[in-house]
Amino acid sequence: MIDLLIVRANLFRISDTQKRAKIKDEMLDLNNIENGAFAVKDGIIVDIGKTDELFKKYKDSAKEILDAKGKAVLPGFIDPHTHALFMGTREKEFRMRLEGKSYMDILNAGGGILNSVRKVRQASVEELAAQLKKRVDIFFSLGTTSFEAKSGYGLDFENEIKMLKAIKMVNDTTKAEVIPTFIGAHAIPQEYKSNKEKYIDIIINEMIPYVAQNKLAKFIDVFCEKGVYTKEETKRILTAGLENGLKAKIHSDEIEAIGCSEIAGEIPMISSDHLLKITDRGLEALKKGGTIATLLPGTAFSLKENYAPARKIIDFGIPTAVATDCNPGSSFTESMPSIITLSVMQMNMMPEEAVVSATINAAYTVDIADRAGSLDVGRQADFVILKEDSYLFIPYHYGVNPIQSTYKKGVKVAHSADC
Ligand code: NIG
Ligand code: FE
């Protein structure tokens, strides 16, 4: 007895063949099965193959048969870098940037991240959770079935923990799978502007142990940037996280290259993110560290900056992932289809490379490849049915939602009204 049989799908499995993030030419093969099918039981894929074969096998025992009518079916997108939990929005700052003010000018004047901090500090854990739940539905409608979300708008013990508890609440009460990251070092809180060392001390000695002991986050992240956290401070904070069992990732080379990516060659780091300004030394470090380059073209687009050198990164043999960076300041979007479009049109990725970067490689970035990111037997039935028969329509027919429906663990969580 199986719960669901999907038939007549143009399947792109994006199989986890290598058991690691895909590199170079591996990123060009989406493991297509024409007229494909798969069987789902208890939210898990239990069989996969051709429609004729699986239909014969399961037609009498399937509780439900879903005819994909030849449409493309892919693993759900995994968005491995977001700040999707926030209160309020920053459209006035958006306009200030259009007038010529820089992102860092706004932050240094007490706006930017610090603006969002003021709003998050005023909210209760329930209000934060309610806000994130609304955003989960947007993610589902755009084909994202798992996403990472960071703290970082609390910037003190109570409020950083409150954010991570809100993420846990959403995981406990919805179908969402949100991977929590602790980023107490997202900015320097105004009350510690002239005593950054004291705040770092609180992060290392109070926040990190509490977060780790209470399993409130899986990752630790730092905004390593000129005027925010230096390379040395970043390394100290990430090392403390590693010692407490968290996995390390980093905001690096977003505005200026100050050597942050080089930390990847010095301590274990799963992902280095942004990389708009990455240097050759940084690239060498990522390769040496086996670190995934997580590229956020929505941020380059919104900040009107040059894009990360994706071609150079891929050709150098470093695996890439792509993410929205969904946040109210530098990239306000929940749309992985838009990120795939920007990856192809502005970072010169091939569509297959972008799709791999948004699925299996993204799954490795947030350490969930054992259960998500590919349509393989034993993985969660997290998948999307597109409105067309090819993934090429994602970057090609841009600015519209290419998703017909989204399934999380075999259950439909979003469906487009026009299908
Ligand atoms: O990835 N640069 C740091 N963090 C975010 C922006 C957060 C915000 O502006 O609220 C980023 O760009
Ligand atoms: Fe970010």
Image (spheres, rainbow, N blue to C red):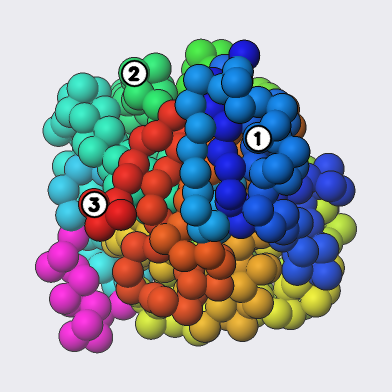
Say which of 52 and 93 sits in front: 52
Q: Nearer the viewer, mark 2 or mark 3?
A: 3
Residues in magenta? Answer: 90-102
Residue 301 quadrant:
bottom left
Label 1 or label 3, whichever comes before in sequence order: 1
Q: Characterize the local packing of mark 2: few (<14), some (14-19) or many (20 or more) Cα atoms within 10 angstroms.
A: few
Q: Residues within 10 Å of mark 1 (few under 14, many from 20)?
A: many
Q: Nearer the viewer, mark 1 or mark 3?
A: 1
Residue at image x 14%, y 33%? 122
Point out the frontmost of discs 1 and 2.
1
- Residues under labels 1 and 3: Cα distance? 28 Å
Which residue is disc 1 drawn over? Answer: 55
Label located before the other in sequence (1 or 2): 1
Q: Residue at x 24, y 78 (%)?
A: 97
**Total number of numbered discs in the rendering:** 3
Ligand 1 contact, mark 2 (Cβ < 8 Å): no
- Which secondary structure lies at badge 1? helix
Q: Amino acid at mark 3?
A: Ala
> Distance of mark 1 from mark 2, alpha carbons?
35 Å
Q: Amino acid at mark 1?
A: Phe
Circle 3 is placed at which residue position? 417
Mark 2 to mark 3 CA distance (whole Å):
25 Å
SS assignment at label 3:
loop
- The relative height of residue 339 versus residue 367 in the rendered view (above or below) is below
User: Mark 2 sits on what residue?
Assistant: 173
Q: Amino acid at mark 2?
A: Thr
Asked if residue 285 lies in the magenta stretch, the reply is no
> Can see residue 345?
yes
273 in relation to 19, above or below? below
Residue 137 percent across, percent down from the top left: 30, 40
- Measured from the top left, where is residue 367 in percent x and y? 67, 37
